[in-house]
Image (cartoon, rainbow, N blue to C red):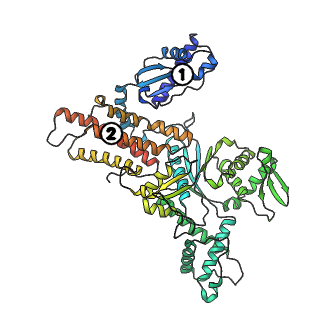
Amino acid sequence: MIKHDIERVLAQAVQQAQESGQLPAVAVPAVSLERPQRPEHGDYASSLPLRLARTARANPLDIANAIASRLPPFEAVASVEVVPPGFINFRLAEAWLAQQVDDILAQGETFGDLALGRGLDGKSQRLQVEFVSANPTGPLTVGNGRGLAIGDTLANVLAAAGYDVKREYLVNDAGTQTQTFAAALYARYQQLFPDRKGSEVPIPQSGYPGEYVLELAKEIAAEYGDIFLRPAGEPYPDELHDLGVQKMVARIRDDLAAAAVHYNVWFSERSLYASSTYEKAMALLREKGFVAEKEGAIWFTSSALGEDKDNVLVRSSGAPTYFASDIAYHYDKFLGRGFDRVIDVWGADHQGHVPRMMAAVAALGIDPDRLTIIIYQLVTLRRGSEVVRLSKRSGEIVTLREVINEVGADASRFFFLQRAADTHMDFDLDLAKRQSAENPVYYVQYAHARIAGILVHAAERVLQFEDGDVSLLSDPAELALIRKLLLFPELIESVARSLEPHQLPYYALDLATAFHDFYEKCRVLPAPGSETPDNLQLAKNRLKLVAAAKLVLARALHLMGMSAPERM
């Protein structure tokens, strides 16, 4: 990656300046480059002299000049400029830029891949991304859609960065939520048998009122008849609970497949208890002195780890809390299955759960830095200026499937990714369906389709471009497009380090804009009948650039879980 190549040369120049006495032998901050906001400032800039000035007790401009004087000639760099108050700016050589088109094409689908997740032995770190994990008590919601876009895109990027990534869905098939769901399902099921006085059975006050519960009850009644009915006053049978959860999980799987999400593991919460994992986790907490009994319950003494208060692990009734189950689950992730890192993607309603979960991981003897919890904020659906509040089918929620059915999976994922996870977002359904440049999804995918069309036309005219000479690419629009293509590996690294996938849609838009600008300013194929040796050679040169743009734009779309259409 050219950015790191320049950083290495810069670090060597600093070392040489110190060894020669031009700079004092003080500790040097991390050498890094930034992208200037203004193109006249070059392709990269270093603020190292400004950061070194205090410890070196020298003028930043003097430091910058000392470092610049030690920089060796570098094929990729056309010029180095020192500018006030102490920046070192680098401008890439146009000839070097042009040659990178061949390099991109040679790397093909691996262009942008990194070894960030690999150790010195070449072995990839094992990393788990757990996301969505909605209770199997109802259909996935719009909020879940944001979580799936973030989690699945991160998994894609981290895999490209060299990690061994596993996607996981925790099925909460134990606890009060599924019990409440089963009670509502049983009430609906009973109502389907009026001859057995089922019509008199009310839905539990805390139950699920959505139409989907009635539909599920009808499906079960059609398949199994009345075998789950029990005498009046008796609770639902366990078999109905399990069947209801099983069918809801199947629906969730279908919704996720419609959004192009596929998991490596569907992990059952019940398995934590069946496998004795829960007991092992609790025993370890006791051994380390983080469990106390008071008020008839069992507590995790998280206050000993800096938390504001202790948290209940086992209620006075003997039932484990959701928190206890989650501790056991993370015990299994780290100490059971041995993941090097874990990323949990949770909704805003779990914000308060984060500090106690981090404390619990530390109490288990696991470095908390190995766990990252991403909290994503709420989504507001709109049709233009009008807020969409409720789903007609599902009661108080708008389902993910409804959104996908209306705007498509690609548009859904792109829009869900457009904002940083920690910010509230508006999702305009009307905009997402619009077939115009105003719709960012259409704009980006149209760029790919336009590229594909150019290559199809070239093939129809039997115009092969393997012998194209990219060294002749020198138009400003050509070079601007190449610069955007070369940002792709840096983008993968940035997203993998920051875990901020919203950078991807912004990059895709910038790349599409650069291509559209190139297309308008640089004719690729000569008009039929006007071919000359010169314009045919120019076409071959530019077709190589077009092919490279197609490859990189498709990779960006695929990382977001989107399709790269050949025509629109």
Point 37% across, 29% down: residue: 97
Judging from the image, what secondary structure is the residue with disc 1 in? helix
In x, y percent, where is residue 547?
32, 41
Q: Which mark is residue 359?
A: none
Q: Is residue 74 visible?
A: no
Dot 2 crowding, Cα within 10 Å, few <14, some 14–19, many 20+: some
Residue identifier under label 1 = 11
Query: Which of the two residues, 302 or 285, is positioned nearer the viewer here?
Result: 302
Which quarter of the figure is the C terminus placed in? bottom left
Q: Earlier in the sequence, mark 2 or mark 1?
A: 1
In x, y percent, where is residue 445?
37, 49
In x, y percent, where is residue 193?
60, 85
Query: Which of the two residues, 358 or 81, is positioned nearer the viewer here?
Result: 81
Dot 1 crowding, Cα within 10 Å, few <14, some 14–19, many 20+: some
Residue 259 relative to residue 93: left or right = right
Which quadrant of the view contains residue 314?
bottom right
Query: Which of the two residues, 108 or 512, is positioned nearer the viewer here?
Result: 512
Residue identifier under label 2 = 517
Residue 86 relative to residue 373: left or right = left
Q: Determine the residue located farthest toward the left in the rendered image.
A: 529
Amino acid at circle 2: Asp
Residue 503 relative to residue 316: left or right = left
Q: Is residue 436 visible?
A: yes
Residue 100 relative to residue 18: left or right = left
Amino acid at circle 1: Ala
